[in-house]
Image (cartoon, grey):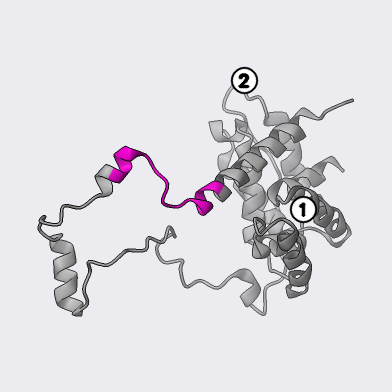
């Protein structure tokens, strides 16, 4: 049996990343004893001056539990592409994939270059433009030799996609089939990012693997 090495490596990397994210989400408070010790507070210790100042300004206590949001400053209120009525997946002009390796040894370079050139063939122009730009930004660096660049740049294309609301019922069904591990909106991005004749193939792959990035980028093999 012939096994395509590039597909195998990318699939295993994608599934490993998905499993890691699931484990982290399911056990957000699990950590080492050292972390727990560092996180414990002495009840007799003086309050943080910054917190004390904030409390005096707002009149609200600051001793309660805190919630940290890992988002880029200034982006929290930006609407998703699908919220823009003028968003058009056909609007986009992907650049030429003239990638460069950082040196003579760059294991995945040939496959990465092939994927980059294929983005416009299986992705809508808007998504393909973002995915190719992502690849070009890594050109000439060690990042272009890492299999993770496939997932990162496929993800960049998905993030730029205008989501078709008609994909929601199908993605909700697949998310339920995957035990909730599949994010519905990310699934919608995938089905909206690819060209119409590829939607069924991507949906079938997502249903089987409960993974999005691999199922989109794997289209370069067809």
Q: Residue at x 48, y 50 (%)?
A: 27
Let me know if residue 84 is in the magenta part.
no
Percent x, y of residue 160: 63, 61
Residue extent of the magenta highlight: 23-36
State the count of labels.
2
| Residue 92, visible in the rendered structure | no
Direction top: furthest residue: 104
Mark 2 surroundings: few (<14), some (14-19) or many (≥20) residues within 10 A: few
Tell me, yes or no, whether the highlighted magenta stretch contains residue 26. yes
Q: In which quarter of the image is the N terminus?
A: top right
Residue carrying label 2 = 105
What residue is pinned by disc 1? 206
Q: Sequence order check: which comes first, mark 1 or mark 2?
A: 2
Distance (Cα) linking label 1 and label 2: 33 Å
Q: How crowded is mark 1: few (under 14 residues within 10 Å), some or many (20 or more)?
A: many
> Where residue 172 sits in the image (x, y, percent)?
73, 67
Q: Quadrant of the C terminus?
A: top right
Seen from the viewer's position, the closer of residues 45 and 124 is: 45
105 lies above or below 197: above
Relative to residue 207, is residue 54 drawn left or right? left
Secondary structure, mark 1, is: helix
Judge by depth and name the residue closer to the eye, 209 or 188. Answer: 209
State the residue at coordinates (76%, 35%).
7
């Amino acid at each position: 049996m012939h096994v395509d090495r590039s597909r195998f490596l990318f699939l295993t990397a994608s599934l490993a990343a998905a499993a890691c994210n699931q484990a982290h989400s399911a056990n957000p408070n699990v950590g080492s004893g050292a972390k727990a010790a560092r996180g414990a507070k002495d009840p007799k210790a003086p309050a943080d001056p910054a917190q004390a100042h904030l409390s005096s300004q707002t009149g609200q206590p600051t001793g309660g539990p805190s919630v940290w949001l890992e988002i880029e400053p200034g982006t929290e209120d930006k609407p998703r592409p699908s919220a823009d009525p003028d968003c058009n997946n056909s609007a986009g002009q992907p650049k030429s994939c003239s990638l460069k390796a950082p040196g003579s040894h760059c294991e995945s370079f040939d496959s990465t270059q092939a994927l980059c050139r294929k983005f416009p063939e299986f992705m809508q122009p808007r998504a393909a433009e973002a995915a190719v730009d992502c690849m070009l930004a890594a050109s000439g660096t060690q990042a272009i030799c890492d299999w993770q660049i496939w997932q990162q740049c496929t993800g960049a294309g998905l993030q730029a996609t205008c989501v078709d609301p008609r994909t929601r019922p199908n993605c909700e069904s697949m998310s339920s089939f995957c035990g909730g591990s599949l994010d519905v909106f990310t699934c919608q991005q995938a089905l909206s990012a690819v060209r119409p004749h590829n939607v069924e193939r991507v949906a079938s792959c997502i249903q089987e693997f409960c993974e999005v990035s691999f199922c989109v980028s794997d289209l370069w093999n067809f």
